[in-house]
Image (spheres, grey):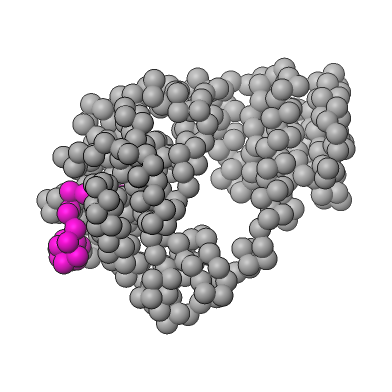
Amino acid sequence: MTDRNILILEDQPFQRGFLANLFNGVSGVHTDTAGDGADALAMCQWRPYDLVVTDLMMPGVDGIQFIQSLAAQEQKPAVVLVSSSSQRMMASARLMAESLGLNVLASLSKPVSPGDVADVIELLSQQQAATRSATTMDVMPLAASRETLCKAIDSGQITAWFQPKKSLDSGSVVAAEALVRWQHPELGLIPPSRFLPLIEANALEPALLRHMLTASIRAQGRWRELGFRIPVSINMPPHLLERRSLPDELLELTLQHGGTPADLCFELMESTTTRHVSDYYAGACRLRMKGFGLAQDDFGQGLSSVHNLVSTPFTEVKIDRALVQGCAHNAALRSALATVITLGSKLGLNIVAEGVETDEELTILRMLGCTQVQGFLISAAIPPERFGELLRQDNPRLPRPFP
């Protein structure tokens, strides 16, 4: 078993010793302790740790300040938050740490149990296994010219895979989200995080959007031959709405390839926005007037707002994974989810929860009245051929078109 170096930062001697005993009881774990944030930072500089377990409420350098300084270091260990603070405080601290690029494995309320420690070690093991399996190619910066990117789009190397959405009413696959993938002939499958910045830098987002739309319509055609009508959602950076002819171009392309606007939904992402808010609302209205569905993506994180949700002609709201993950054990998250789902229902929207990974989260979402779910618990994104096989196995009801 791989040795794991863990640092525990806790100012109370009894709690510090208690946590050290829990972690030291796990085979292959070596634990250091610190009672002060400044000392812990110094220890992190001379020894690489796999995991840092930190309290929040401490004199001197508190847990928040410690995390901010830890995130500035070149070596960034995983983090577990331990505190007797409120769930809202813990959730806020976790979001702060994650926004700084730290991997927060868990937020634990005191007193910590042996079961909590076992869960943390399991999560740490999964992270280390994923890191070991990553190839050098996955972490190397990707260099590709505009010509190379255009060729990859035109040849179909860059194409759409599809992540299923399941109905919580029927339990069947009723829709899909198109997610971009690059099957490079030499480098293998390249994750989108490595090439999407190059697509944006080379002003190829409109070409990619048209390509994803075409690929989605073709996949829908193959699924129809199998007897299934599956709506597909496609991500769209809102700044593309500055092109006033875009709704007309997308409708023309859809009809040219035999697609149906009512079976296609554009998810407005939060990564960018239009320079003039009028372009955003004009584009959104015209897309709906052409018959396309329209979704607010990542609701619950970043700049998404209730005002934007009620003032844009959306047909769907996608609840961000930040509100989903941990909802089974966090009353504040459950309350936020309930509010969003109730609002979406009153607005007549299809409600999709992203990032569902556990049966407990699925149970909470079903109880709260969520419409659909997607995430690794259901399936990762898969090629259209495999999606067709999934449909045959699942035998879903045919979904209704967008209103």
Left or right for 18, reference 55:
right
Compared to 312, does 338 lie above or below? Answer: above
Q: Could you tell me residue 234's position as x and y percent?
A: 32, 54
Q: Residue at x 35, y 51 (%)?
A: 388
Q: Is residue 317 visible?
A: no
Q: Could you tell me residue 105's position as x and y percent?
A: 65, 37
Q: Nearer the viewer, residue 369 or 399?
A: 399
Q: Is residue 268 magenta?
A: yes
Which stretch appears magenta?
248-270
Q: Residue at x 74, y 53 (%)?
A: 75
Q: Nearer the viewer, residue 218 or 353?
A: 218
Compared to 394, does 91 lie above or below? Answer: above
Q: Residue at x 16, y 67 (%)?
A: 256
Give residue 329's quadrant in the image: top right
Q: Is residue 122 visible?
A: yes
Q: Nearer the viewer, residue 260 or 4?
A: 260
Q: Could you tell me residue 1's position as x and y percent?
A: 83, 42
